Amino acid sequence: MIDSHAHLTVKAYRRDLEAVLARAGAGGVTSILTVGFDMASSEAGVHLAEKCPDIYAAVGIHPHDATTLNLDALGRLEELASSPKVVAIGEIGLDFYRDLSPRRTQEDAFRLQIGLAKDLELPIIVHDRDAHQRTVQVLREESVSCGVLHCFSGDLNLARQGIELGLYISFAGPITFNGKKAEEILGHIPDERILVETDCPYLAPVPNRGKRNEPAYVRYVLERVRSRKSTPSPNRTPAPSSAFLNRPARPPSRSVVTPVATNRLYAFLWWHCGFLV
Ligand SMILES: [Zn+2]
Ligand SMILES: [Zn+2]
């Protein structure tokens, strides 16, 4: 199992990160992607990933902090992304639920970081809260074809639009709260386009809802995804997310920013998105 979206560098783990990681390992979590949301968490994530073989990092500025993304910050993100452990740009996107930055600024920051991801040939991790249509519009206008709609909260129509663009759909704890909508969506998404995540320390899945979340709990999300698939497909990938580990990565035909061999997690994604063709 992979936790494809965690925030391991936040205060919530300051005291016991080692124990948290040990529980994840004991529970069968083989890799964790720790995702940046501002400059400090992006930097800390890269440092952590460089120390721990099974941890990977994504760097990016969340829409809440969109006002902090200037050209200097963009340059610093690019510098951080040169680490071989950085496998994506994120999380980036639009949040019209909390509106902590002006919407126009959020969109500018989103587009700038999409541009960075394209320059670096990295997938993006998209945060979209109450901004579904605008998010899809930006993704279309920027011709994004490689990335993940994380902590998916949209409807089937949005999932279909994401898949059409070539994106992955990632589910987190909320899928265990109320499965009705998710059930409908899951039945229509190919297994190989589904990822699971915790988005920890937030949104702990049932049976730990309300508590601090951690990567070991990704199994509850995965179990729910499996149980909600209306028609089991025996010939398909048996476990969402672990597909990344089971697929042989195509050897790079030209040099890329990040050596694929060390990036099991997103190697398939890159291959799938055609960056290495
Ligand atoms: Zn998010
Ligand atoms: Zn997150």
Image: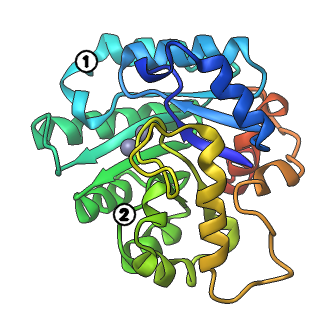
In three-dimensional space, the C-alpha distance between marks 1 and 2, rounded to whole angstroms, equals: 29 Å
Q: Is residue 51 above or below residue 180?
A: above
Q: Amino acid at mark 2?
A: Ser
Location of residue 252 in the rendering, given as x and y in whole percent from the top left corner: 83, 38
Closer-to-camera residue (115/268): 268
Location of residue 72 in the rendering, given as x and y in whole percent from the top left corner: 32, 10
Q: Residue at x 28, y 63 (%)?
A: 132
Q: Is residue 110 left or right of residue 124?
A: left
- Count neighbours of disc 1 (C-alpha within 10 A) and say few if under 14, some if 14 to 19, many if 20 or more: few
- Count neighbours of disc 2 (C-alpha within 10 A) and say few if under 14, some if 14 to 19, many if 20 or more: many
Classify residue 157 by image quadrant.
bottom left
Label 1 element class: loop
Closer-to-camera residue (261/191): 191
Classify residue 129 by image quadrant.
bottom left
Location of residue 27 in the rendering, given as x and y in whole percent from the top left corner: 76, 43
Q: Residue furthest left?
A: 102
Residue at the disc numbered 1: 70
Location of residue 7 in the rendering, given as x and y in whole percent from the top left corner: 49, 30
Q: Residue at x 50, y 21 (%)?
A: 13
Q: Is residue 167 left or right of residue 180?
A: right
Q: Is residue 195 visible?
A: no
Asked if disc 1 is less than 8 Å from ligand 1, the answer is no
Closer-to-camera residue (141/110): 110
Q: Amino acid at mark 1?
A: Asn
